[in-house]
Image: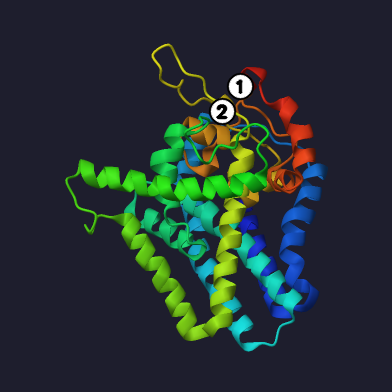
Amino acid sequence: MKDLKYIAAFSIPLVALIGLYFQGIYTFLTPIYAFGIIPVLELLLPIQTKNLTEDEVASSLKRKVFDWLLYLNLPVVMALIIYGLTIVSNDALATYEFIGLIISLGIVLGTNGINVAHELGHRQATNERFIGKALLLPSFYMHFYIEHNFGHHLHAATPEDPATARYNQSVYSFWLTSTVRQYFNAWTIQKQRLKNNNQSFLSVKNDMLWYTVLQLSYLAVIFTFFGKIGLIFAVLSGIGGFIMLETVNYIEHYGLLRHKTKSGRYERVREMHSWNSNHVVGRIVLYELTRHSDHHYKSSKKYQILDCHDESPQMPYGYPTSMVLALIPPLWFKIMNKRVPRQMVAG
């Protein structure tokens, strides 16, 4: 039964569904749950640092239930989008209800959309990567697959990485710099990959071009069937989804830097170059994303077998709580700056 604990990750779309159905003040139930109830639970429940044994790892890798729990997010997310579009385009919602539903769907797109897409984007199977890219579509972040896999994992914890927040950089500044730089980095990476394979910009292998076409087509379909209100709802929810991602990016590597070796190259990525959290609720609802140090140490590891490393910098709170703290820069700096290794601050 412990394998099924990750079903709890579907509690977020479930809460969003309740908000869509009952409307009124319930439209804000998702942000209250994600950034109110979960942080309280994380404060009350003990931190779990235990790692799986070799036998448990081997057993976990054989069980497909962990994979199917990821795949199930695609129909869940898409169904919720369609239901949300139907509600906003047909019901006479108050402005506050419309805003509440945008925030709620944005949270779902960030957690059960982009976060799951991130996990599947590291898989080797084509069908798994397809599901991952489909989950990025509603947040207009399909370029994330290219920049994250071929950019971020190479440059993490260096000034060259747009997804690594600088020491004393606010999350609001980071939203802008990371979003813009990641998009253009993805194009740079794509063009270099085309060049390496002697392919033209208009080649069918230009994934960035396909992503643009697919995302524009997605919006065109929504406008056709759900009108202007549906289009506004989809666009703002998608923006909410990638802001969720960028807030997570912000806390994952904040202030951490790799040093250059005598050869002029950066030292290899180690467990100390990502913030780790063992707060159990966040671990489960985010499919172990909070054990980010081990993910960067070996990105091919599936989420259910990620380890905690003692040498990793530890967050004092879980990821959901830390995301809230990041929105208050003076408080975030006061809590986190003293935890950044001094040698990294010195650069």
Q: Secondary structure at mark 2?
A: helix
Q: Which residue is mark 2?
A: 273
Q: What is the three-letter code of the residue carrying label 1?
A: Met
Q: Nearer the viewer, mark 2 or mark 1?
A: 1
Picture quadrant of residue 93: bottom right
In the picture as drawn, the residue positioned furthest to the top comes out as: 262
* Rendered location of residue 124, percent (x, y): 35, 46
Q: Is residue 78 left or right of residue 24?
A: left
* Rendered location of residue 47, percent (x, y): 74, 36
- Looking at the picture, does residue 224 appear above or below residue 309? below
Q: Is residue 92 left or right of residue 134?
A: right
Mark 2 vs 1, N-terminal side: 2
Query: From where the camera sits, is residue 327 visible?
Result: yes
Residue sitting nearer the eye, 70 or 94: 94
Q: Which residue is mark 1?
A: 344
For the point 75% across and 54% down, which residue is it? 35
